[in-house]
Amino acid sequence: MQVAQSLTLRRGADLRQGPLAGRYFAVAAMVMLALIPYLALSAALGPLTPIIATQLHMSMQTMSLGSGLGNAAYAVGTVLAVQFAQHLPQRRMLVVYAVFLLVGSVLTAAAQDAEMFIAGHVIQGLCTSLLLIAAVPPLAIGFPAHKLRDTAVIMNVCIFGAVALGPFVGGLQAESHAWRPLFWIVAAISAAALVLAVLTFDDAPPANPDAPRDLRAIALAAVGCVAAFFGASELTTHAFLSAETILPLLGGLATIVALVIYQYRAKQPLLTVRTMLTSSIPVAGITLALFAAAASVSATVLTAGVLAGRYSPVHIGLLYLPEVGGAVVTAIALGAVIRRRAMHYLPLVGMLFLAAGIAVFLISVPSSQALTLLGSGLTGIGLGATVAPALFVAGFSLPSANLQRVFAIVELFRAVAAFMVAPIFVHLAAHAGGNLDAGTGIALWIGLGLAVGGAVVAVVIYALSGARPQTPDLERFLAGSAPAWDSPPLLANVRSTERI
């Protein structure tokens, strides 16, 4: 209904357009340039952190706090983007987001002190998620069905290719004992994204001006994410059970749970929590995405950490470069199956590859160069084949008018699972088992359990709900009135048995 109203308004009004408006590849390029900077930079910060901290006179705890606040801003932005889209002209807001992304990128590149650097990084994180939720769904549903394949490939390459490339880029920059050149390149990419946002401008009205302004949901998301990520960042210098760590960490998680419960019970929710969490296929998709995001941390961050004292940063980056190849391979695979029943199986196959990659890393801690190359390639395939495909699996289960909300929920949960779990696993590896190698092995076993457990849980959800792989009806989905396939209620088979 909202899509139809939007199209009607656009036909009836003389709305402004840029010279490249409506051209798919120009809009897709804008999306790629908007998402890559922060995601790649976050993954590249590891080898650059000591250099930045030294030059800006920051402690490692302050650097950790800045990274945590940037990730918290990314998580909160997913909820803010949905609220803004309801009441403000969406394409005008997209240009505003791109402007602030450029401002944040320039602030970090030109930073003279900790405050300037952290402020810029937080703005980058916030604007990246705002752009993701504002730009990707229109790219997916604003063009003919055959373009969905290209959109799926672009999403995988942008989100996971950029993250996979980060360690190599960061290691390469660290070899020169400098960090500003990389950050200025990121600022240039952000400027290019802004230029394309203006050139592809296609004025569009708000999605639903009559929707309520849910300030409570935004406040819960902001308080929960900031507190949880603050607590996780404190693990750099504090024990897990210290008040500085455990209280904000648990309090933040409890607040995020309160947000989910509040949105589930709300009559006019900002996020489609009730629809998603009572339907089998979206729940299975979200489960896979969360478990994969959490498990992948142990496979990459921790195994690279135990190699840090043995090889140079660029050498380590080269060892993990197969992850980029894995992201590209799975992006192509996602494009190939997005119109087929096999779409349901791809996230499950990805979890098996992710588990296999972690198992390879467990053969020897630290891994040999050959095992690291093999393990990084397998985990790259695993991560690329799980999160983005699971996101589309969940999205296809609801009418396309809800796609922004679906993306927001999945990205909020994924950000919490991936970004917050990382410092917890790093802390565990450093303090468990008596030494770093033994601690890393323990964390890897946990990651393997998460990968296998996530796959099992998703299969059980399908089985107990009577869900079956189906060929998506993308034309019906893009029409905006119905989902691409039918998703039975969660645990429908169990409920029917109880009634009997």
Image: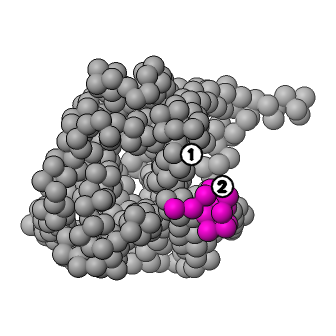
Residue at point 66%, 55% (across, down)? 274
Q: Which residues are magenta?
A: 237-251
Q: Which kind of residue does numbered mark 1 sit on?
A: His
Residue at point 44%, 58% (across, down)? 404
Residue at point 44%, 27% (across, down)? 365
Was residue 67 drawn as part of the magenta stretch in this picture? no
Disc sitting over residue 431 in the figure: 1
Give the structural element (helix, strand or loop) at label 1: helix
| Lower position in the chain sequence, tag 1 or tag 2 | 2
> Mark 1: few, some, or many residues within 10 Å (few <14, many ≥20)?
some
Q: Is residue 84 left or right of residue 330?
A: right
> Mark 2: few, some, or many residues within 10 Å (few <14, many ≥20)?
some
As measured in the structure, the alpha-carbon distance from the residue carrying label 1 to the one carrying label 2 is: 40 Å
Which part of the image, by quadrant, shows the C terminus?
top right
Q: Which kind of residue does numbered mark 2 sit on?
A: Arg
Residue at point 79%, 31% (across, down)? 494
Give the structural element (helix, strand or loop) at label 2: helix
Magenta: main secondary structure: helix
Disc sitting over residue 115 in the figure: none
Disc sitting over residue 274 in the figure: 2
In-front residue for pair 423/26: 423
- Mark 1 or 2: in front is 1
